[in-house]
């Protein structure tokens, strides 16, 4: 018996029965037990029964919907109301009518999300390329199964796949649909599970069938020469990158670039976009273009409108006079989702286990699964023919003496004894006797029986052929290949998505498009920024500032240069000087917190022109520490405009300097003391947020106040303040080495 734990004497006693009852209801449980009993079953349910597709290319919700429509007779019959289909599907899928109808919409021809839709729809089913075009309610639309669904259900009634109970065990449903082609590669699919996701892009049906046939004939074949690339129902163009495509084919992961198509109507000076990437919508493109026009980055466009109608998608762009449409579209491809990337994550459930596979692995799994389906179908047919042969052999026995059979039946007094007497009289089993007993009187003649028994030889040949087929993998392969060729012949369509190579397209270089000329930039203490041309400076060089404001920094540079603004929130904002308008000395300039969308109470503390990102940044903090960070740590390959963690937040920033080479600096404290040291004493750090090393030791009530280049100071007695090692306290500042204001 485990020893009981002694009560805690220091624990206050509770006499309130309600509180005591509440405490008794609380059961302590380890977090690992909670995860195992509560979270893991949910996670597994989402992975296995909701979000990840299986080898037939369907999620459970797709499969339940299509099977319900098949059982409703919608493969060969006419359309019925969508609401009727949704209601019937709830017998298999208890997730609510809205979720079921959303699934139907995505599989429909009207919505256009699939290269080969499975639902032949009538009515408003929305459009995949529109974010705001909502589909009509299920009571207004109609649907039936598309003809390609014959390839999903052809073997369903021939024991090709297993059937399982539905959620309440009242009916059966197929665990998979025996597709006669690799639908997993043809129908685009995506899902987000718990801890994993799946993103399958669609390929052209004809190419997939050809690739599968080539793989069956030679598993080492070059798939990339047959399967050219993804094909999307919205068209567009795939920007072919051989290395990226081979990575996707090999691993099942990667990214593929796609872009829209356009045409230029010269007489109207209008660009018409008629195909867009599968990953975006017309509204997203229009919103982004409007944003660029508003910010002054798209001055070539006078108007843009959505002219989509029943004939298809069309976005019209009115160009200003003299604008090169090819250069404009290159700019739009660069700055909007007219050119986008689609991520590939070929995560598929294989035997109840999620697995990320390349195209070759997927074909291997599908071929193995399809081989099993064909064998099960042949076994089913073989069993039926063997049963029929068994019955005909019993009938053949009666041919020997029809009169005897009639006599046995006529002389049998009890109806229940007819079958046993026939079994005894002719030496046949019960099944054969039942078959004979059910023959109508008019058919008990020699002609009828001879015709039936003549089928025996043909049945024997068929059975022998089917048994050979089951046991010969080469013949099974030929059956699969023949079915694939038939599917391609009946349903294959030309590619909708074109393929272009990177060397064939015009790229947009923002630096080349931006005019370059000399400018001088000014940053004030309060965060006002001005960019002024030399001509404007010659006309008036007296800078205007607000009251109690003044100049913080000034640089001479060019209009194409990049600039970085560091803030008191340890953040840095990166932008191009071309993003700012040219101004005059007589104006205040752009207020950076508003211009750059800074956080509340965020102010600019310094400006850097990074150039080629060579050199180092030195951060000096009020606690006397200094950090040396390579400027290359702030370089980014993407167009990120905001970086967090620009420098350490352990102490307020006193000064920031950009150095190309080591030099001597003068540090001043509020005591006042001064210290001269060489920056070579500072070792570079690998992280931007490093606290640095102590350079100047300070008394508790003082702090580092200013840092200057040595040549910019008034210090005359250099040896007094110079140090060879750090940290150092420096020397008290003498009057002859500093201005009176600093001494005060």
Image: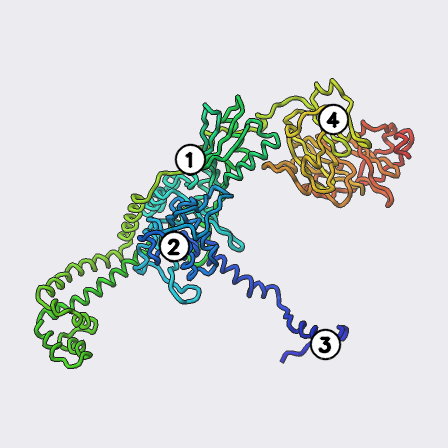
Q: Which type of secondary structure does the marked residue at label 1 adopt?
A: strand
The one of 129 and 1 positioned closer to us in this rendering: 129
Q: Residues at badges 1 and 4 in contact (C-beta under 8 Å)? A: no
At label 1, counting other C-alpha atoms closer than 10 Å, the crowd grade (few under 14, some 14-19, many 20 or more) is: some
**In the rendered view, would you say 650 is above or below 655?**
below
Residue at label 1? 499
Q: Measure the C-alpha gap from mark 3 to mark 1.
A: 77 Å
Q: Which type of secondary structure does the marked residue at label 3 adopt?
A: loop
Determine the residue positioned at 22% across, 64% down.
386
Q: Measure the C-alpha gap from mark 3 to mark 4.
A: 78 Å
What is the quadrant of the N terminus in the image?
A: bottom right
Residue 479 placement, left or right of 111: left
| Residue 724 can be seen, yes or no | yes
Residue at label 3? 7
Q: Which mark is residue 66?
A: 2
Q: Measure the C-alpha gap from mark 2 to mark 3.
A: 63 Å
x, y percentage for residue 567?
72, 38
x, y percentage for residue 590?
71, 31
x, y percentage for residue 406?
10, 74
Residue at label 4? 587
**In the rendered view, would you say 293 is above or below 443?**
above
x, y percentage for residue 76?
31, 53
């Amino acid at each position: 018996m485990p020893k009981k734990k002694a009560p805690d004497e220091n624990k206050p006693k509770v006499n309130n029965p309600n509180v005591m009852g509440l405490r008794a209801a609380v059961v302590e449980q380890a977090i690992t037990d909670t995860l195992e009993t509560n979270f893991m079953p949910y996670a597994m349910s989402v992975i296995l029964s909701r979000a990840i597709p299986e080898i037939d290319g369907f999620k459970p919700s797709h499969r339940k919907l299509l099977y319900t429509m098949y059982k409703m007779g919608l493969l060969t019959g006419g359309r019925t109301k969508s609401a009727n289909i949704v209601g019937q599907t709830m017998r298999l899928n208890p997730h609510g009518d809205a979720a079921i109808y959303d699934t139907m919409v995505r599989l429909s021809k009207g919505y256009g999300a699939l290269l080969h839709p499975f639902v032949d729809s009538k009515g408003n089913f929305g459009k995949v390329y529109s974010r705001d075009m909502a589909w009509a309610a299920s009571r207004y639309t109609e649907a039936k199964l598309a003809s390609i669904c014959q390839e999903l259900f052809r073997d369903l009634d021939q024991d090709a796949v297993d059937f399982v109970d539905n959620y309440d065990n009242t009916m059966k449903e197929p665990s998979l649909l025996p597709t006669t082609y690799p639908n997993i590669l043809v129908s685009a699919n995506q899902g987000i599970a718990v801890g994993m996701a799946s993103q399958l892009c669609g390929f052209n049906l004809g190419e997939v069938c050809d690739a599968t046939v080539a793989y069956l004939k030679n598993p080492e074949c070059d798939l990339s020469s047959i399967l050219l690339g993804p094909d999307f129902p919205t068209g567009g163009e795939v920007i072919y990158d051989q290395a990226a495509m081979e990575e996707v084919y090999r691993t099942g992961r990667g990214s593929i670039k796609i872009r829209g198509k356009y045409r230029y109507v010269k007489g109207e000076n209008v660009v018409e976009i008629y195909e867009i990437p599968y990953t975006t919508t017309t509204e997203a493109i229009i919103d982004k273009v409007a944003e660029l026009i508003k910010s002054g980055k798209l001055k070539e466009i006078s108007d843009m409108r959505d002219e989509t109608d029943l004939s298809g998608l069309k976005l019209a762009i009115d160009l200003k006079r003299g604008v090169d449409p090819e250069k404009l579209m290159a700019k739009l491809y660069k700055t909007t989702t007219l050119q986008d990337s689609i991520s590939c994550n070929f995560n598929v459930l294989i035997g109840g286990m999620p697995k990320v596979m390349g195209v070759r692995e997927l074909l291997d799994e599908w071929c193995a699964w399809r081989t099993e389906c064909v064998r099960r179908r042949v076994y089913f047919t073989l069993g039926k023919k063997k049963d029929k042969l068994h019955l005909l052999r019993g009938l053949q026995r009666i041919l020997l003496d029809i009169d005897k059979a009639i006599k046995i039946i006529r002389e049998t007094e009890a109806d229940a004894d007819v079958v046993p007497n026939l079994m005894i009289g002719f030496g046949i089993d019960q099944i054969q006797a039942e078959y004979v007993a059910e023959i109508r009187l008019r058919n008990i003649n020699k002609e009828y029986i001879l015709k039936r028994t003549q089928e025996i030889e043909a049945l024997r040949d068929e059975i022998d052929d089917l048994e050979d087929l089951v046991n010969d993998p080469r013949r099974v392969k030929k059956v699969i290949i023949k079915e694939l060729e038939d599917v391609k012949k009946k349903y294959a369509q030309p590619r909708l998505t074109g393929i272009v190579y990177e060397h064939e397209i015009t790229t947009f270089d923002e630096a080349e498009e931006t005019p370059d000329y000399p400018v001088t930039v000014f940053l004030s203490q309060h965060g006002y920024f001005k960019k002024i041309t030399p001509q404007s400076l010659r006309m008036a060089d007296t800078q205007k500032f607000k009251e109690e404001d003044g100049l913080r920094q000034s640089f001479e540079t060019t209009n194409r240069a990049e600039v970085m603004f560091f803030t008191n929130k340890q953040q840095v904002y990166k932008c191009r000087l071309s993003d700012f308008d040219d101004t005059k000395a007589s104006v205040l300039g752009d207020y950076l917190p508003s211009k750059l969308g800074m956080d509340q109470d965020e102010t600019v503390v310094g400006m850097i022109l990074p150039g080629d990102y060579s050199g180092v940044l030195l951060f000096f903090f009020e606690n006397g520490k200094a950090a040396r960070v390579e400027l290359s740590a702030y370089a980014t390959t993407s167009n990120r405009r905001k970086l967090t963690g620009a420098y350490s937040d352990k102490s307020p920033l006193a000064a920031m300097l950009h150095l190309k080479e080591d030099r001597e600096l003068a540090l001043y404290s509020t005591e006042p003391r001064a210290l001269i040291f060489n920056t070579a004493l500072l070792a570079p750090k690998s992280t931007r947020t490093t606290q640095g090393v102590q350079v100047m030791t300070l008394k508790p009530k003082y702090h580092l106040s200013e840092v200057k280049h040595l040549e910019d100071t008034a210090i005359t007695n250099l040896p007094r303040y110079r140090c060879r090692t750090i940290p150092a306290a420096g020397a008290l500042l003498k009057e002859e080495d500093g201005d009176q204001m600093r001494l005060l």
